[in-house]
């Protein structure tokens, strides 16, 4: 009997870590969802509702997609539509669903040495390069970096030289560096508002169509990566497009910043193109 009890105890102890692992979901996401504080609200809500524990990896969108592609995450929340479609075509990521949008803004020193305020995005990037005004790029293959590259291309410029600095860091850190250097940078509006009181940068250009910033959630394909927690990944993705999460997104930021940081889009037509 004693041997049977010991064997049962050992089997239960061995099963406990496995059960805990099954209850965890690995989320790879862009830094803007973390830096803005949105995940600080949504993740506890999901954990309470679904009984899962979320392990968040907040990196650039390019890195998030790569983690999903390698089966090192269960679900991704990202904002680079063109890049996302490449992984969908590969079949490593599936079930891409629209979650929300906000926009990118071009920020810089309040005195605006390049004179970009109130213009169009491509023209503003052209002026920054022409005048050699310092610009800090994330340089990390994130969704923001992808958008920045598209805007330089639209301006007919391949940025290089001492005025162009790559931080290789997330959005919050890049904003801090740009502020310290008195430089321009491209940022999502949510992270800028979250950091506004800590930095000396003003919004100088906004509202141009190419600056639209769209977020999707995608699951990692268990047919390609059998070891991923497909059930947990799907549960998180389902939650992000649920009425409950969308209601949180709709009002997030209003109390603190006087305006929402994101706009919920689940079930709606795509609000535009990546530009």
Image (cartoon, rainbow, N blue to C red):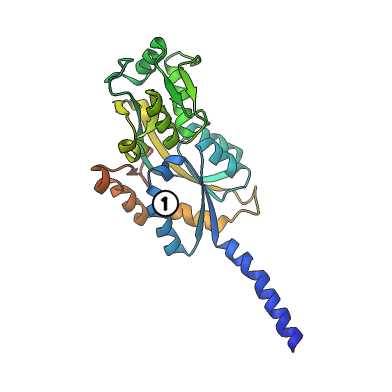
Q: Which residue is mark 1?
A: 240
Query: Residue at the right extreme?
Result: 3
Residue at figure coordinates x 42%, y 21% from the top left = 135
Query: Which quarter of the rendered picture does the C terminus lie within?
Result: top left
Q: Quadrant of residue 3?
A: bottom right
Query: Residue at the front extreme?
Result: 180
Residue 53 point in image, percent of width and height: 50, 60
Q: Quadrant of residue 134?
A: top left
Position of residue 182 in the picture relative to residue 28 (left or right):
left
Disc 1 on helix, strand or loop? helix
Residue 61 point in image, percent of width and height: 50, 37
Residue 49 against residue 180 in the figure, above or below: below
Position of residue 6 in the picture relative to residue 40 (left or right):
right
Residue at figure coordinates x 54%, y 56% from the top left = 25
Of residues 11 and 272, the one nearer the viewer is 11
Residue at figure coordinates x 63%, y 43% from the top left = 70
Residue 8 against residue 252 in the figure, above or below: below
Query: Residue at the bottom extreme?
Result: 1
Query: Which quarter of the rendered picture does the N terminus lie within?
Result: bottom right
* Label 1 CA crowd tier, 10 Å (few <14, some 14–19, many 20+): many
Residue 21 against residue 174 in the figure, above or below: below
The reply to whether residue 88 is in sight is no
Q: How many numbered markers are drawn?
A: 1
Residue at figure coordinates x 31%, y 36% from the top left = 196
Residue 202 point in image, percent of width and height: 29, 28
Of residues 269 and 257, the one nearer the viewer is 257
Query: Residue at the top extreme?
Result: 130
The reply to whether residue 163 is in sight is yes
């Amino acid at each position: 009997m004693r041997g049977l009890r010991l064997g049962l105890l050992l089997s239960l102890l061995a099963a406990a870590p496995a059960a805990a692992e099954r209850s965890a979901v690995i989320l790879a996401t862009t830094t803007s969802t973390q830096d803005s504080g949105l995940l600080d609200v949504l993740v506890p809500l999901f954990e309470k509702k679904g009984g899962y524990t979320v392990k968040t990896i907040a990196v650039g969108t390019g890195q998030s997609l790569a983690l999903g592609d390698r089966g090192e995450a269960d679900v991704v929340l990202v904002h680079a539509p063109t890049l996302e479609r490449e992984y969908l075509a590969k079949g490593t990521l599936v079930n891409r669903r629209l979650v929300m949008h906000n926009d990118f803004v071009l920020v810089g020193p309040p005195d605006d040495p390049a004179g970009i305020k109130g213009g169009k995005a491509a023209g503003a990037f052209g002026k920054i390069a022409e005048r050699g005004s310092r610009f800090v790029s994330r340089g990390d293959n994130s969704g923001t970096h992808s958008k920045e590259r598209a805007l330089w291309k639209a301006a007919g410029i391949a940025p290089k030289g001492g005025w162009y600095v790559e931080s290789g860091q997330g959005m919050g850190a890049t904003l801090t560096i740009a502020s310290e250097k008195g430089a321009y940078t491209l940022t999502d509006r949510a992270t800028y508002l979250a950091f506004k009181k800590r930095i000396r940068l003003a919004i100088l250009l906004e509202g141009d169509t190419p600056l639209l910033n769209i977020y999707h959630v995608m699951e990692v394909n268990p047919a390609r990566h059998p070891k991923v927690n497909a059930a947990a990944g799907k549960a998180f993705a389902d939650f992000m497009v649920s009425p409950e999460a969308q209601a949180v997104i709709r009002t997030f930021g209003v109390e603190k910043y006087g305006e929402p940081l994101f706009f919920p889009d689940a079930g709606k037509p795509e609000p535009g193109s990546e530009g």
